[in-house]
């Protein structure tokens, strides 16, 4: 969440009033993240102040965005703690600010847990399973736009920037994932809407209690196992070495399975999906690092982090307990 487009207080105030949320009190740019323009918005209505997050979408189109916004409303209606997009008088939740598609959503309580323990991993695993079940009857479809097709399209533009060892790893892993994606076992994996980016900074806790998931703008229909793998690669990984903390990973998966048991093939294919999750974010970080866009408050993430994780997942496969 960075600032690519400058929103004036007058423009934000106009949106707040159109959504019947009162009057604008404060508008503040959010400095983290790399995809969209984001601001914290505080509005006051009848003496009560409420905080929201305003997002201007820099890459996603007006045609793509209803999938994400209505998914959030769908999940919120089923008791999953996610930001609920605010509607105007006609019920529209996709708005226009500075000529760009925009949404205003609730700001979740609490803060990030950047050094998660078993307590936090257990709650995220359980809530992720609840979210997967709650989304199974969501009627809209959109593929994971940062899935295999995007990897194949993006890698050629990255390769010239890498050394020989990095190129070899990237090309060999992409070939492995392309082959794996054609296997009958992979094609039969359970699927549905997934978050696809549920890192530590996309979950909120108040104390040690989970208060919500947010930033659904990489969501899409994909395997549930990919969503689990993305989480394990962040929530249950040593940040310095990239090694999987098997104890935390076991806690996470056990909590998930208590809500939605994994199939035999999901357990068997976990190592391949952990590699896929690492590859996806290595590619996207390389892309952001070497082919950046301008932004007022933008710092690309270190690509080396997911290179280390990918090497660890290739050489040290991990299966959850059956």
Image (cartoon, helix red, strand yellow):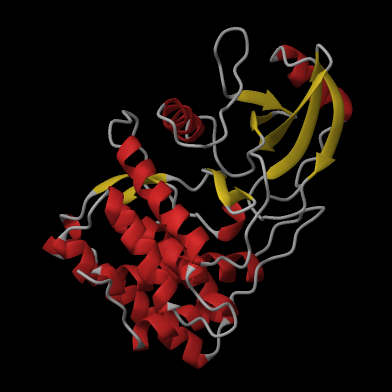
* Residue 95, position as x, y percentages in the image: 63, 23
Instruction: Residue at 84%, 15% (x, y): give it.
Output: 47
* Residue 249, position as x, y percentages in the image: 40, 70
* Residue 33, position as x, y percentages in the image: 67, 55
Instruction: Residue at 28%, 71% (x, y): give it.
Output: 320
Considering only vertical position in the picture, is 95 above or below 248? above
Considering only vertical position in the picture, is 301 above or below 29? below
In this image, 146 relative to 60: left or right? Answer: left
Whether residue 209 is visible here, answered yes or no, is: yes
Q: Quadrant of the C terminus?
A: bottom left
Q: Residue furthest left?
A: 184
Considering only vertical position in the picture, is 167 above or below 222? below
Instruction: Residue at 59%, 54% (x, y): give it.
Output: 208
* Residue 229, position as x, y percentages in the image: 38, 64
In this image, 197 relative to 2: left or right? Answer: left
Q: Which picture quadrant has residue 300?
A: bottom right
Q: Residue furthest top?
A: 89
Whether residue 146 is visible here, answered yes or no, is: no
């Amino acid at each position: 969440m960075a600032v690519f487009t400058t929103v004036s207080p007058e423009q934000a105030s106009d949106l707040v009033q159109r959504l019947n949320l009162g009057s604008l009190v404060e508008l503040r740019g959010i400095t983290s993240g790399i995809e969209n323009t984001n601001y914290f918005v505080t509005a006051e209505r009848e003496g009560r102040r409420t905080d929201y997050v305003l997002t201007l979408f820099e890459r996603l189109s007006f045609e793509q965005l209803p999938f994400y916004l209505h998914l959030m409303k769908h999940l919120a209606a089923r008791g999953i703690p996610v930001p609920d997009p605010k509607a105007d008088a006609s019920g529209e939740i996709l708005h226009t600010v500075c000529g760009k598609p925009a949404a205003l959503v609730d700001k979740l309580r609490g803060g990030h847990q950047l050094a998660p323990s078993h307590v936090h991993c257990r709650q995220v695993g359980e809530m992720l399973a609840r979210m997967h079940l709650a989304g199974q009857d969501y009627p809209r479809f959109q593929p994971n736009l940062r899935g295999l097709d995007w990897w194949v399209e993006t890698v050629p533009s990255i390769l010239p920037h890498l050394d020989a060892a990095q190129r070899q790893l990237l090309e060999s892993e992409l070939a492995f994932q392309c082959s794996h994606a054609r296997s009958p076992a992979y094609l039969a994996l359970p699927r549905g809407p997934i978050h696809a980016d549920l890192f530590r900074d996309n979950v909120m806790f108040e104390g040690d209690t989970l208060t919500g998931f947010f930033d659904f703008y990489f969501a899409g229909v994909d395997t549930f196992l990919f969503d689990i793998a993305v989480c394990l690669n962040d929530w249950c990984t040593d940040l310095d070495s990239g090694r999987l903390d098997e104890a935390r990973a076991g806690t996470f998966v056990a909590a998930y399975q208590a809500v939605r048991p994994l199939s035999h093939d999901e357990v068997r294919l976990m190592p391949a999906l952990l590699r896929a999750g690492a590859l996806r974010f290595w590619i996207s970080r390389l892309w952001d690092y070497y082919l950046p866009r301008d932004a007022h408050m933008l710092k690309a993430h270190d690509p080396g982090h997911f290179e280390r994780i990918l090497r660890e997942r290739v050489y040290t496969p991990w299966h959850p307990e059956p």
